[in-house]
Image (cartoon, coloured by chain):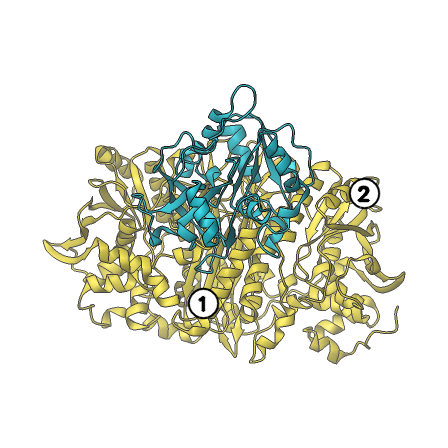
């Protein structure tokens, strides 16, 4: 062992994020004090970010199996079967903490990291989506973050050459000190050429490929496993710096090297860098690994073994090649002008052995770093605030004086208004497969060489999750599945990004437990497995936790790409129908928030079996060619869904509808929110066929009115309750986001 | 007609052009690596979009000095045609094979959106199937597409009909509102004096199938195919 390293003490262990108990456990496992480098390995691998130590026991409840699942959680990304030789791989990941500290690079490297997870599987990335949350749009600090985050995503994704297919942008005061940047990437892979992050075959060479290692991002994983205090911005050096150009070269080189057959396993060096890759790869294969750090390409001088192992420099991969075929790997990377250096080999002794110029600086069983990482079953407590929230009755508030004005206010609110300001900065078409660009309920890509298409969405209404974590999280799954159903797609699988506060607080852990249970319930009822995801805890600044935000990323399959649908009305004279129940609530609604700045009340009930029938009925109507448009009815309720269908297409078109005259308050009828609801426009010649089809699915539905006219008009019992001319609808929706944000 | 699609480190429209030429147009096409100087097999070379060399220094600056670009004058002298789209246009300007320069968008943001183009010169090998004044729909996707030239160059471009496409409204009016990046005179595409090199910021390959929202981009390819006469040389304008 080298003598130049600091002496390892309990204080040092505590300072690096480990607990005293964890430190004792390390000493017991090793039978000695760890070296400084070993302490670094443990602090990174046992961080919440890498070890999922607070979440693991809850995640076990998620359904992960299904007939189409080729790879579930535990690898770089999940994989589902698309039929034939094709499979889809996708995953969502958070980059919240780095994006708060340095929004541009934080968001950019978030995109870079998730793209590497996709192409390590042997896939070519075909899409990214982004789910973003910020503090109030009017707050200048939020604007700085939005501009930085969006331009970071734009820079990285555009330069890399992957289309952006959608996502979400939402706002709440709880995100002011802790914005969320969740990036989802999707790739297409040949089933016969799937790569996994395993270090198979003792004696095989281990290659370091890609960018050189610097001191950036050291202890990023540990940073992501702590809450922020006032000194957060001083942690800028823990944020990585991205280079999308190198990533693009790395993509081409990796895919080309994989083609040669010389690559056996490959893992991205993301969180915890070499430390993570060098222990997880052998752990998955039941092998060991030896590496010599003096061979690691470095762009700074004098880096210590600790720094080299923990650096989170971007655009790097660790790959295991077949012995004797090293030259084939080197040749491909040389063509793309990237480093490919043999830094070690796979061993059979289950140890991670790290050397510097021959001297051993760390020697740890890989299992101790990975499988044996602590798992906690910490206490959970239902927060005291839940009862107060549930007790509030929104109907004690006055009815808006003018529902037409209320609709315009909602349409122009930054959460609902058009997000074109965001996505026009993203390339949406590179690869020329984009059938539906951002701006409808789901983004849709064709799968060349087939008649199929893939639909993609991310969803989460965090207010609902806050008010009722279990039901709210189930509703996020239901909404994602609905967004696919209205596009004509059948859900294939979920990837989830679970953003929460500190799990060391029993109330937060209760939110987490309930939310995961809700996701599990909904996924079981709708038959959608979870194939991967990410947990992001410690989203707190100065004790203020974010709203619990389990973002659901979902991919679905459309058998006939031609049958896909979008959310906007197309043809005057088409008949409008509402599928789903009439039960809605203003609890947690957009109206309550936008008009009254209040987040409270009870959610409308969720009946997952009915939800499923609504999706099936919608898909059947789309497949039969009866429906010209279909749109999920969510934030802002029925009035907003109708207005969006009027103005979000290439050509604004009006609509006239008749509301149920059941005596309910008009604001509840127009703006109340509830699950399992969607609005379709039916071709006039298909009305009878549509009625018969709906009858077969045993679900509540009703005709609402017709497409056409100079604006959106709603009547009830012969009285006009809402009337807004098209140009006002269009203006409010089209410019609302910019008015608040830019 | 033999097409070559040039690949620089960081190019990403290469696969898209290759796909349109081989699958939509059913024409022979091969990739050309940026180090290649041997271009005799090709009738038309395409410099596609992307971020060659990461746009480092300036968009197209490094690629504009690469071996394949150095070999272009000889290729053109032998009768070859060159089409540069997006980053390809930037590279051709950097290499001084086209006049003017492409600067950061006036809005200072990247723009990916649909645009309308007015055909200003329909007498080039790239546009001969179009009508003068015809309006085409083609998407753009760039952060540095603001065309600039000094007054003398602009006058020459106008006099010699080297302005081939200008951004316009859906009805053909060339107005400021229709200019997505602040280009001088709404210029979207220019051709060299000899009529052998066309550069444009929009992406014709993304407008080559109905499923992608339109086929106006195909007019460029079909013009090229119609311009090749039997002896392998191109019809001059």
| Residue in the image at 53% along x and 33% along y | B19
| Residue in the image at 41% along x and 69% along y | A172
Q: How many marks?
A: 2
Structural crowding at the residue carrying mark 2, measured as other residues with C-alpha within 10 Å and reported as few (<14), some (14–19) or many (≥20): many
- Would residue B65 appear left or right of A172 to someone viewing this image? right
Query: Is label 1 in a helix, a strand or a loop?
Result: strand
Q: Disc 2: which chain? A: A
**Which hue is chain A drawn in?**
yellow
Above or below A138: residue A719: above
Q: Position of residue A150 (x, y in %)?
A: 48, 60
Could you say which disc has been placed on residue A134 in the image?
1
**Which hue is chain B drawn in?**
cyan
Q: Position of residue A457 (x, y in %)?
A: 45, 50
Quickly name the residue at label 2: A326
Near-viewer residue (A669 or A101): A101
Q: Going by the picture, which residue comes out furthest to the left?
A: A718
Q: Position of residue B223 (x, y in %)?
A: 45, 29
Indicate the quadrant where residue A420 lies: bottom left
Q: Disc 1: which chain? A: A
Indicate the quadrant where residue A110 lies: bottom right
- State the separation of the CA atoms marked 2 and 1: 47 Å
| Residue in the image at 26% along x and 39% along y | A682
């Amino acid at each position: 062992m080298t003598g130049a390293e600091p002496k390892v003490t309990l204080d040092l262990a505590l300072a690096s994020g480990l607990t005293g108990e964890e430190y004792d456990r390390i000493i017991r496992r090793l039978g000695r004090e760890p070296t400084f480098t070993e302490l670094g390995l443990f602090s990174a691998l046992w961080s919440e970010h890498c070890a999922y130590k607070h979440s693991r026991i809850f995640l076990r409840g998620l359904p992960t199996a299904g007939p189409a699942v080729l790879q579930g959680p535990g690898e770089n990304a999940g994989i589902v079967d698309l039929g034939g030789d094709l499979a889809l791989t996708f995953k969502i990941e958070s980059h919240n903490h780095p994006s708060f500290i340095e929004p541009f690079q934080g968001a950019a490297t978030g995109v870079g990291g998730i793209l590497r997870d996709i192409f390590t599987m042997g896939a070519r990335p075909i899409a990214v989506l982004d789910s973003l949350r910020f503090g109030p749009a009017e707050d200048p600090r939020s604007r700085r973050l939005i501009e930085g985050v969006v331009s970071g995503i734009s820079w990285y994704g555009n330069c890399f050459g992957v289309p952006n297919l959608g996502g979400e942008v939402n706002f709440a005061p709880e995100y002011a000190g802790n914005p969320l940047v969740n990036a989802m990437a999707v790739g297409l892979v040949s089933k016969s050429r799937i790569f996994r992050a395993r270090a198979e075959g003792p004696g095989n060479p281990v290659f370091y490929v890609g960018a050189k290692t610097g001191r950036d991002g050291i202890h990023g994983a540990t940073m992501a496993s702590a809450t922020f205090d006032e000194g957060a911005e001083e942690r800028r050096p823990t944020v990585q710096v991205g280079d999308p150009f190198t990533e693009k070269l790395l993509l081409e080189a990796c895919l080309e090297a994989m083609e040669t057959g010389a690559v056996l396993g490959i893992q991205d060096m993301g969180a915890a860098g070499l430390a993570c890759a060098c222990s997880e790869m052998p752990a998955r294969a039941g092998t060991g690994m030896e590496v010599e750090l003096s061979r690691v390409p470095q762009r700074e001088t004098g880096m210590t073994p600790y720094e080299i192992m923990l650096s989170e420099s971007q655009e790097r991969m660790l790959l295991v090649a077949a012995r004797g075929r090293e030259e084939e790997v080197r040749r491909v990377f040389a063509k793309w002008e990237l480093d490919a250096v043999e830094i070690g080999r796979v061993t059979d002794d289950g140890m991670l052995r790290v050397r510097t110029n021959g001297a051993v600086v760390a020697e740890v069983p890989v299992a101790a770093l990975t499988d044996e990482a602590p798992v906690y079953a910490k206490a959970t407590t239902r927060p005291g605030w839940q009862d107060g929230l549930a007790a509030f009755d929104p109907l004690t508030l006055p009815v808006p004086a003018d529902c037409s004005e209320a609709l315009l206010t909602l349409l122009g609110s930054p959460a609902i208004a058009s997000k074109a300001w965001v996505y026009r900065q993203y390339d949406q078409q590179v690869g020329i497969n984009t059938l539906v660009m951002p701006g409808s309920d789901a983004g849709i890509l064709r799968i060349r060489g087939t008649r199929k298409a893939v639909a993609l969405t991310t969803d989460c209404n965090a207010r609902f999750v806050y008010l009722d974590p279990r039901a709210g999280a189930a509703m996020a799954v239901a909404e994602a599945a609905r967004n696919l159903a209205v596009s004509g797609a059948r859900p294939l699988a979920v990837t989830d990004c679970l953003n929460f506060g500190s799990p060391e607080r029993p109330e937060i852990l209760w939110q987490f437990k309930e939310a995961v249970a809700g996701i599990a319930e909904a996924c079981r009822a709708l038959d959608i497995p979870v194939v991967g995801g990410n947990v992001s805890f410690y989203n707190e600044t100065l004790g203020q936790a974010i709203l619990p935000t389990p973002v659901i990323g979902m991919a679905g399959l459309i058998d006939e790409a031609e049958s896909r649908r979008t959310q906007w009305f197309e043809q005057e004279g088409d008949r409008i129908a509402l599928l789903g129940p009439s039960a809605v609530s203003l609890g947690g609604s957009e109206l309550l928030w936008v008009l009254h700045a209040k987040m409270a009340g009870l959610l409308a009930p969720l009946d997952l079996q009915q939800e499923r029938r609504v999706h099936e009925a919608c898909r059947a109507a789309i497949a039969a060619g009866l429906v010209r448009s279909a749109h999920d009815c969510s934030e802002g309720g029925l009035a907003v869904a109708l207005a969006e269908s009027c103005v979000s297409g290439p050509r604004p078109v009006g609509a006239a509808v008749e509301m149920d005259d059941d005596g309910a308050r008009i604001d509840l009828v127009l703006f109340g929110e509830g699950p399992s609801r969607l609005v379709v426009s039916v071709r006039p010649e298909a009305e009878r066929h549509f009625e018969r089809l709906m009858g077969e699915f045993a679900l509540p539905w009703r005709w609402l009115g017709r497409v056409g006219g100079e604006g959106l008009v709603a009547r009830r019992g012969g009285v006009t309750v809402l009337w807004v001319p098209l140009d006002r609808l269009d203006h409010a929706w089209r410019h609302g986001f910019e008015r608040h944000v830019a | 007609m033999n097409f070559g699609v040039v690949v620089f480190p960081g190019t990403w429209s290469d696969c898209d052009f290759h796909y349109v030429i081989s699958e939509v147009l059913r024409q022979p096409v091969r990739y050309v690596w940026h180090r290649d100087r041997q271009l005799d097999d090709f009738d038309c070379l395409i410099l596609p979009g992307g971020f060659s060399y990461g746009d480092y220094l300036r968009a197209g600056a490094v690629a504009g000095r690469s071996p394949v670009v150095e070999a272009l004058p000889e290729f053109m002298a032998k009768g070859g045609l060159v089409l540069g789209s997006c980053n390809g246009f930037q590279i051709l300007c950097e290499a001084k094979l086209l006049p003017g320069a492409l600067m950061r968008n006036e809005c200072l943001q990247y723009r990916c959106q649909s645009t309308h183009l007015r055909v200003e010169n329909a007498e080039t090998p790239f546009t001969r199937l179009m009508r003068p004044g015809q309006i085409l729909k083609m998407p753009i996707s760039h952060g540095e597409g603001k065309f600039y030239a000094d007054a003398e160059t602009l006058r020459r471009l106008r006099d010699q009909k080297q302005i081939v496409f200008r951004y316009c409204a859906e009805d053909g009016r060339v107005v400021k509102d229709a200019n997505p990046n602040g280009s001088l005179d709404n210029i979207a595409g220019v051709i060299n004096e000899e009529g052998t090199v066309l550069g444009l910021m929009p992406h014709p390959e993304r407008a080559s199938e109905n499923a992608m929202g339109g086929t106006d981009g195909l007019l460029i390819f079909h013009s090229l195919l119609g311009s090749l006469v039997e002896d392998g040389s191109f019809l001059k304008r």
